[in-house]
Amino acid sequence: YSLWHKMEMKHDRNLDHIADLVALRVILTPGDSFVQEQQAADSGVWLCYHVLGLVQHLPNFTPMPTRVKDYISFPKPNGYQSLHTALMYKGQSVEVQIRTAHMHTVAEYGMASHWAYHDEKKRSSSMDLYNTPWLSSIKEWQQEAVGSRDFVDCVRRELLGKRVFVFLRNGKILNLARGTTAVDAAFQIHSEVGLNMHGVEINGKPVPFDYELHNGDVVSILTGEGKPSTKWMRYAKSRSTRSKLRAYFRSQQNENVLKSGEMLFFDYLSNHRNEILENSYIEYPFEVPTTVDELQPFLPGSSRYDDVMDLLNDIGHSRSGDFLRQKVSKIFMVPASALQECDESRFANITRTVYASQLDSISFNGANGDDSDTDMPDVLNGGQTEFADSESVCFHCLPVRGDEILGTRHRDGSILVHRKECSWAQEALSSTRFPSSDDSLGEPVQLAWPEDNTWEDASESFLTEVIIMAVDRKLLLADCSVIASKNSEILKTGSSSSNEHCILEFLVRVKDLDELQSLMDKLREVNSVMSVERRFGSELLDESDL
């Protein structure tokens, strides 16, 4: 049957192309003293290669070098080991199989049955019988498979399909399914190697993550600060690799949800501290908690939560401001109506502030127009321009490197950096036209940011505040927080919501105006975000952030 199957599948029903029509099998049985010195599975291996050399030098036989297969160094996934070679004798091809008695038992009766008979004394437990890579893979696939058809397809593709053998730098061999990529190789080595991979070298040359591995490739996985990307799901061909990636992305999402829940809850407590203390029915004096540890004692008896993390996780998953308000009301025994009234008032105030800031900016630009340069008196600094000091900025307007700026020099000689449209800077500028006895405004100074080649301190950063108006939805804060943290340093957040809309506030550090603009552009791409604006100054900033 095997000959017929080969003719049907590989050789177009041509018997002349069958190399093992005549086959010999050489089974080597080392002596007992030799077996005692080595493990049964390893004894006689070198004899197989010795016999292979003898066979290929038989008189009147011509070896066929392209027909040599080494299944000892590169076993099949089912554990099969043997040396195969083909010789030509008077026009007839002869296949020769060389193996030890141990290898023959595995080939004929299966690996598990051989262990059950020979290695019973060596196994510490019956479970060791199944501790082989291929059996472990089958168990893993069986647990992950959605249905029986999915399981069978996985076994057929990854275990019974074609294999590819690659080397690691330490000489270890990886046995992978054909078509697998560098991502699969990294996770085959270890999950932590795959999760921390930031580059791959094949045969000493850098390659992309979707590189398809070939027999004999030397794989070097570079690890460090790397993090998996969702693109890796497309590159991964192995079911095990995709399963590990899905688990990682689920854990990351859970961490983001928990973090967003913590930010929402404690920002809400910070913004409503006075209302909570004034309206709470808790009989003993208390302080509004600011950390997870301080919050824990308030939970037992006042809510269904015994663990703070469960509470924060539910808040992070929730899309409703009413849910957050309800939890705060129950935990601190505050009437929900008092909190709702405060929320509505705060939402209206923030909305008015945003639109007022936009109108002020429009009116300032329209009033100055193209005359902004000509309106700047030449008497400032005698027409000289000084460089701005990034550590001395006005916290009323929070200028960022790249803004048009103006300075004010004070009695101690220090120069404060303002945005041009800052009211304090404009009042100081007006004082040069209409002198007054009030010198608290300072003397206006024409300033400019240092050129790029003089900007030596790459660690310099600037505070600024971003306001996001959006349609409220689940995981909105988590999505915005991920974008903000990747493109800036988040110092503080704030939030408020109405029935359908919400406002998110981020106090962040950025390097310059370009980085701020990039952050705002990416936030505008978040689903359900209606607008992203830069606040003039900050309402979240306090002395601890300076």
Image (tube, grey):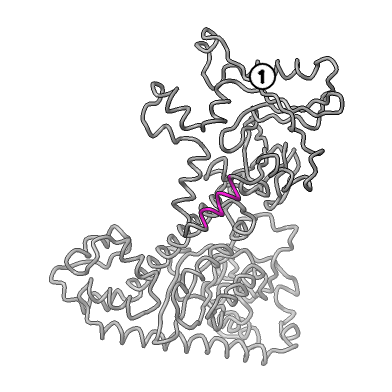
| Whole-percent x, y for residue 371 in the image | 74, 88
Task: Give above or below for 287 relative to 121.
Answer: below
Which residue is depicted at the point 67% across and 46% down?
A: 178
Figure quadrant of residue 223: top right
Task: Give above or below for 65 relative to 296.
Answer: above
Left or right, 502 with respect to 342, comes to right
Question: Residue furthest toward the top?
Answer: 33
Left or right, 331 with respect to 245, comes to left
Q: Is residue 445 magenta?
A: no
- The magenta region covers 150-159
Which residue is depicted at the point 61% across and 72% down?
A: 522
Task: Give above or below for 81 relative to 61.
Answer: below
The residue identified by callout 1 is 48
| Whole-percent x, y for residue 476 in the image | 47, 74
Figure quadrant of residue 24: top right
**Foreground: 492 or 542?**
492
Left or right, 67 with respect to 320, comes to right
| Whole-percent x, y for residue 250 in the image | 47, 60
| Quadrant containing the N terminus in the rendered view | top right
Q: Is residue 152 magenta?
A: yes
Which residue is depicted at the point 60% across and 68% down?
A: 415
| Whole-percent x, y for residue 15 in the image | 79, 40
Task: Give above or below for 365 relative to 379.
Answer: below
Answer few, some or many: residues within 10 Å of disc 1's Cα (few below 14, many 20 plus, some between 14 and 19). Answer: many
Q: How many discs appear?
A: 1
Badge 1 marks a residue whose secondary structure is: helix
